[in-house]
Image: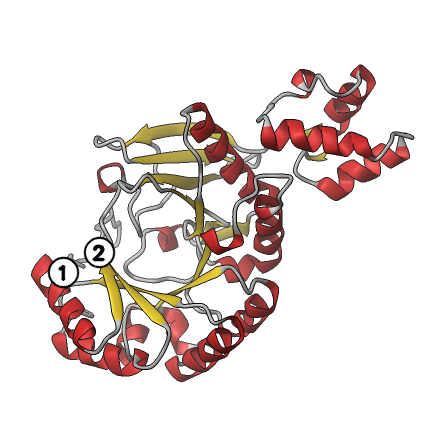
Amino acid sequence: MFSIHDEEKIKGLLVDNGMKPFRYSQIENAVYKNFVSDFDEIQTITKDLRKLLRENCFYESLVVETEKTSKNGQTTKILFKTDKGEFIESVIMRHLTWRVTLCVSCQVGCPMGCSFCATWKLWLKRNLEFYEIVEQVYYAAKKLNDEWDILRNVVYMGMWEPFLNYDNVKKSIGIITEQKKLNLANRRITVSTCWIVPWIEKFTQDFPQTSLAISLHAPNDDVRKAIMPVASKYSLDELMESLDDYVKKTNKRIFYEYIMIAWVNDDVKLAHELWNLLKWRLAHVNFIPYNPWENIWGNKLETTSRGVVEKFQKILLSYWVVSTIRATMGDDIDAACGQLAEKKL
């Protein structure tokens, strides 16, 4: 059995059974444009083909375990159960600007061990298959379509490191941006990474129009190593060299994520170091309030005050480095940045 999202295998199935190639276009249109979610409901194909698909393909490998929307209605957190009995999470964010973003997962758990994130306590169980990533996007797109809304942005920023599952992430992006499928614009796809440096060059070649976000969180190696183990493997100098090459080849601005943690990475002197790191670079800093999570190991991290975050932003602005303070969305349902941890709602 294979996924309805596996175009190559479906086309092979059609050829092996003596069916015309145009039949795939009919299937594709029904699935992605009309959001038909049952083989028997695809009325544009023959009964024999519906039977063939039913016997060889599956529509869904993920099942919604729970779904909850925040009190203000802006954020919906979906807990999916895989066919292997594991759990992953996706988050739909409805911004006040009418822009809708989906945060998707690409791994079950995470091996990176960042101290500010709940996902790492699950450790890495496995990489998701490409169709499991696509199913998250498809579910959100269909849900929003039913609500007379449109999914415009997808960020690979859930569970967790996309570059450690590069091939499946690459294939999933190809499917969701395909014009005849979900037709999301490449420029509206963002891949967020803890910066696995060797893969940045490959990403540059494969996705020159796709946005890149870097989990920076500190402007020097010492502070980064204290909160992000990956910093012990790849230095900041190595990272910035690879990012400079990315910008040179794509002319795209890089988004730098900076989670503000009280007394860890919010000393004002670090704001000046951050400016020094990013000066003359095509950069946009997203300051993200630290979102506490239930920590079985007693992590005592706390959120930086709004005043300190604004002071950071003011310092960067004085040096012409663009930044924003991200609004926290979904913290009341544990759906904010750093809170995804397979928690049943």
Q: Position of residue 137 (x, y in %)?
A: 50, 39
- Of the 4 image quadrants, the one containing the N terminus is top right
Count of numbered badges drawn on the protein: 2
Separation of marks 1 and 2 at Cα, in angstroms: 7 Å
The residue pinned by badge 2 equals 290
Crowding at label 2, few (<14), some or many (≥20) Cα neighbours within 10 Å?
A: many
Q: Helix or strand or loop: what does disc 2 sit on?
A: loop
Quadrant location of residue 7? top right
Comes first in the chain, label 1 or label 2: 2
Quadrant location of residue 240? bottom left
Q: Is residue 224 visible?
A: yes
Looking at numbered disc 2 in the image, what kind of residue is underneath it?
Tyr
Tell me what residue is drawn at x 57 percent, y 43 percent: 183
Q: Position of residue 161 (x, y in %)?
A: 46, 58
Tell me what residue is drawn at x 39 percent, y 28 percent: 66
| Left or right of 66 on screen, residue 310 | left
Looking at numbered disc 1 in the image, what kind of residue is underneath it?
Thr
Residue furthest left as drawn: 307
47 or 293, nearer to the observer: 47
Q: Is residue 274 above or below residue 97?
A: below
The residue pinned by badge 1 equals 304
> Dots 1 and 2: beta carbons under 8 Å?
yes
